[in-house]
Amino acid sequence: MVTHNPEIAARCSRIFFRETGSFMNEGLSNHRINSATSILLRVVLVWATFFFLLAHPGPICASLLGEEGTEMGKGIKGDAFDFDTAVRICLKRSPFLVRSSLEIDVRRMDETDSRYSFFPTISVRTRYYINSPKQSGVKTEPYALEFSTDGYNPLEAYFSLKARKLLTQIAILSHHQVISKGLLFLAQQFLELTKLHLLTAAQEELVTLAQKRKEYLRERQKLGESTTLEVKIASQELGLAQREKERLLSSQTRLKEGIRSFVGLNPDQKIHFDLQTVTKQVIGPFDASAASLADARGRSFEIKIQALAKELQALRVMLAKAKILPNLFMGVQSPDPLNNVSNHGLFFSVGLSWPVWDGFQRIRDISRQKTILNQYSADQEVKNIDLSKEWQEAKEKLSTAEATIELAKSQEELSNLKVHQSEIRYYHEGEPLTSVLAERRGYMEAKKNTHLKSLELEQAQLFLRYLSGDLVCHYVDERSSRP
């Protein structure tokens, strides 16, 4: 059963007009079609086909959408889905970036409204008298017509436009800030997924070792050299290893689905995760030792937004001062029949208006806006202090992670040496196989610990890259309003 899908119909209509455009041009230029009747017939046939497609967008639209659907899926289906590919798709399709992107459009529409406010709003007012007054010797019209403007303050319109432009810039920076946080989240997910893949491989080895230990003890039990308790313990260890493997696989599935949802892919869209170069792509050429707090301050979206907000508040102070000035109004009107004026035509007037008494609200508003401006100055200083504190904490965390990973590598190397030692004793000194399996298990546990500490190091490097602004600047041009 074919159901009507408005989205498919809309896409079909776009393809339809694209494909039939050349069809119409060729028909009009063909020397065999030179009559108005033939052209009219061709137009009718084209539009009839168009409405048929809208009414039946099933198989026909599917064939039309074949080329476009392939183009939309290009670069995803059948190709390696690595971090760079995920970022490229995320910037175009992620639903988590839509709201901040649309906010830019809203602010630009507000900016357009402010541009038109340079021209005063013109209103028209008409009145017709059913029983118009009569006066001897005076001929009046039974209607009145008036064109008038609202109160107009050009300085207020000027400062309002500048404020709207700043709000648009703030919306752009806020959108880039959302992108930066989104890239951080996506990079963290890819790093964690990569390490989970390595941890799963190590856990599979642990499952194999536990299986060998269980089989070895069972054979020894048959020979009377092992107890039932030892076999039960080995079975429990095997079950725990298998459940840990299942947990790791489940975590991988969860992360993959989270990444798929975040970048905006369809649930049924098949992708192949390529985790070979994730660390290189996420960390990139970023040198944590060369990164400085000055670079982070220069690229910080929060500090830039706060600076624009302070500038915007300064405009609000000027706007409050501009409201003290009188408003200008103009008008064109015809004589009112009730005034018993014999003159006819339209008469132009201009004037000024301002409140005589408002309880000094406009004066106090200036002081209020100046106080808020001082608050923004204090907030800007706090933002700089918070960034400095966060930067120092990130540097300390990175130093701790670097020291921890070296310790983990040393422990892994030591465990590997113990494995070789136990194998030598097993082959030459008759040491039981359980000792070798125990050392191998210790080595795999040390290897898993190295992977976990490596993840902590890479996440620390990633967060420092995020704070420095290098991560978002690598994928997004800061000067553009759209990624």
Image: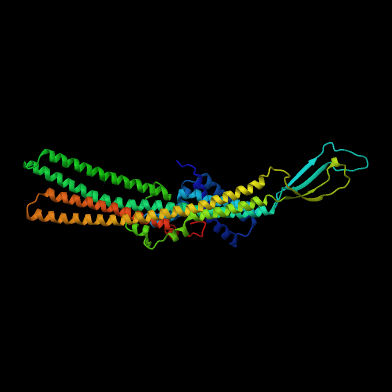
Instruction: Pinpoint residue 226: horizontal percent, then vertical percent.
Output: 9, 42
Q: Nearer the viewer, residue 243 or 40?
A: 243
The image quarter in which residue 360 lies: top right
**Which quarter of the rendering shows the N terminus?**
top left
Q: Position of residue 402 (x, y in %)?
A: 31, 57
Residue 185 x, y percent position in the rendering: 40, 51
Residue 7: give x, y in percent of width and height: 50, 47
Residue for point 47% across, 56% down: 300
Residue 122 vs residue 448: left or right?
right
Residue 363 seen anywhere in this rendered image of the structure = yes
Choose between 106 and 366: the one closer to the eye: 366
Vertical side of 87 occupied by 58: above or below:
above
Which residue does the image show at 84% across and 41% down from the upper left? 142
Q: Up-down: is 406 above or below 141?
A: below
Q: Is residue 80 visible?
A: no
Q: Residue at x 31, y 44 (%)?
A: 250
Above or below, 241 against 412 in this view is above
Please tell me which residue lies in front, 37 or 285: 285
In the visual, does 3 lie left or right of 26? left
